[in-house]
Image (tube, grey):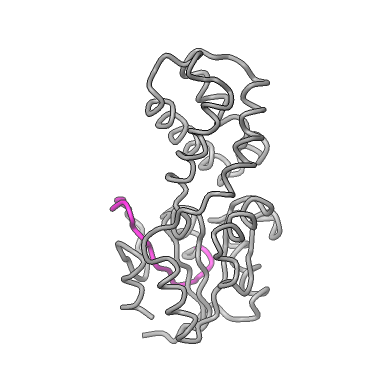
Amino acid sequence: MPRYKHLFFDLDHTLWDFDTNARETLTEIYTLFNLHHRVTAPFQEFYRAYLHHNEVLWDLYHKGSITADELKWKRMWRTLLDFRIGDEPLARDMSARFLEILPTKKNLFPHTKEILDYLVQKKYVIHLITNGFEKTQWSKLNNSELGRYFTHVITSEASNSLKPKKEIFEYAIRTAKTSLNESIMIGDNPEADIQGAINAGMDSVLVNHINAVTTLKPTYTVRHLKELEGIF
């Protein structure tokens, strides 16, 4: 087994439970903007529509097809359009409030702090590589008390690159002053995290919380974070 020294984690959907936190945030947004008077469908349908458009637009953002600003407000815009609400100013206002509230949420996947404590005790150096926005990601880390675990936090904004491009991984390796053979990427997203690691020549762990099907071949696959103890 390779001797890893530096572990690079993804944040959203790997450690920080984006879907649960987004649901709580959207519930507040729904009330704040009185959407129950304008959306005839149940909130659950609105939430599902948001998750769909968020996933599609993040994929476009990963591919460089849209800007960060377009991602932020168009996920709200497209969700509203699904319910025949063509109100761009409303979408932009909702996006701004969403980005204020979301990072204050603290829901993590089971065993997150337990496994990070375990890895710290075993003297691994832990970092983060995230396509999230700098201010938003730091707010999530501070509010969820995860920031103390990470020696370096590499964001797409700081590195001027995005997973799965190899450049963000190369930037992370340089920042951590380590090498590829001492490093491993740990994340939930086959395209961004696993393909990105493959592009950079780095080993990887797929944290497959949702049993996603992929043709990619990570170095290791786990179903939940606790199983990382069997690797490290």
Camera-nearest residue between 200 and 147: 147
Q: Residue at x 58, y 80 (%)?
A: 179
Which x, y percent locates residue 45?
38, 26
**Which image quarter: residue 159?**
bottom right
Q: Locate the C terminus and report the quarter of the image it occupies.
A: bottom left
Q: Looking at the image, which residue is at 66% across and 27% down?
A: 92
Q: Is residue 203 magenta?
A: yes
x, y percent for residue 78: 53, 24
Look at 50% across and 70% down and name the residue there.
201
Residue 124: x %, y % from top left: 50, 82
Q: Residue at x 46, y 65 (%)?
A: 198
The magenta stretch spans which residues?
A: 199-213
Quadrant occupied by the N terminus: bottom left
Q: Is residue 61 magenta?
A: no
Near-viewer residue (149 or 193): 149
Q: Indicate whether 19 appears above or below 226.
A: above
Q: Nearer the viewer, residue 220 or 34?
A: 34
